[in-house]
Every structure is written in C-alpha cells, then in structure tokens.
Amino acid sequence: PGFWMAIRNIVKDGDDILTKVCRPVEKFDEKLATLLDDMAETMHDADGVGLAAPQVGILRRIAVVDVGEGVIEFVNPVFVEQSGEQECVEGCLSFPGEYGLTKRPYHVVVRAQDRNGKFFELESEGFRADACCHEIDHLDGVNFKTRAIRMLTEEELEKLK
Ligand code: ZN
C-alpha cells in the first residue's frame, strides 16, 4: 500500500464485460501488482468485501476479498473443495442497491497464486466462503443475480439498513 494506489472505476450492471469469461494470468509483473493494489483500494473505497478484475474492466482471473480480516489476493483461483450449504444475502458493487438470497457452500478451499506466482491454498467458512464464491463466479461471467433464489423485497432491504 502507498500513495501511488488509485481508485478505479467500477463497471456497472448492463456492461457486457460482466458476462465474459476471464483469461488466466500468465505474467506476474509490476502491472499485476499495481492492479491488485488498485483493486484493494477500490474495494475499500466502495465499502465492498470483494472485487473481481472484470469489475474494473480487466478480463483476467484476479480477485480480492476482505471480510474484515485483511486483503486476500487470488490470482487464477480454483476451488479444490466445496462442502456444506448456507443461505446468504448478497449484494455486488456492480449492482448497487440490489440484494439477493443465494445458496452457497458453507466451506470452500481455494487454490490460487499470489502476486508473485506462488501457489497457496486457503480454507474458508461462512461469510468468507460466500465472498470467495461470489468473486470467483465473476471470473466466469456469472453474477449473483443468476445464482439468486430470489431478490430481496423493499421491506427486507429496509430491515438490512
Ligand atoms: Zn460482485
């Protein structure tokens, strides 16, 4: 983190880029590091808990997640384990003001690379598992509204506030 970071524009619903499949990252260079820094900054600025590269207009398999425990960076993430089930209330920085009820695995293990290309595995449960699923979905052009059992009503939204 530092003064050189920049907040990027978040792509909103209706933009085609949100429906496209992202390509893998092959180069672990300064450009990738800058993008990851910017994505974290953009996510925090927007009070989000996750952000995927297509949401800032880049069709690469990159996502960041921060559910209040610090930023996790995923490059080329894949699920190696998914188990259990949970009902989640989800929103998305690309769909401001919209929330839906989804069913996600309660427990996931993600295998990914860090900004230097080093492989790691991260186990998550509950809210963080949900965030991982939501962000990795974006890399395949899938948004939470596709996954939603139903969207929340105005009344339910009021209660969330
Ligand atoms: Zn999203």
Image (spheres, rainbow, N blue to C red):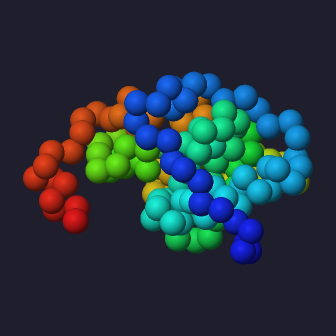
Is 45 placed left or right of 23 in the picture?
left
Q: Quadrant of the C terminus?
A: bottom left
Q: Nearer the viewer, residue 124 or 145?
A: 145
Is 73 placed left or right of 28 in the picture?
left
x then y, percent, for residue 29: 89, 49
Reply above or below: 131 against 102. Answer: below
Is 26 placed left or right of 83 in the picture?
right
Tell me which residue sits at (51%, 66%) in the image: 45
Tell me which residue sits at (57%, 25%) in the image: 20
Q: How many marks?
A: 0
| Location of residue 8 (image quadrant) | bottom right
In this view of the protein, can residue 60 be seen by the observer?
yes
Q: Quadrant of the N terminus?
A: bottom right
x then y, percent, for residue 24: 76, 32
In this view of the protein, can residue 117 be seen by the observer?
no
Tell me which residue sits at (66%, 38%) in the image: 58
x then y, percent, for residue 9: 54, 50
x then y, percent, for residue 142: 49, 30
Q: Nearer the viewer, residue 105 or 84?
A: 105
Reply above or below: 38 against 24. Answer: below
Tell me which residue sits at (51%, 48%) in the image: 10
Reply above or below: 12 against 96. Answer: above
Q: Nearer the viewer, residue 72 or 36?
A: 36
Q: Nearer the viewer, residue 20 or 153?
A: 20
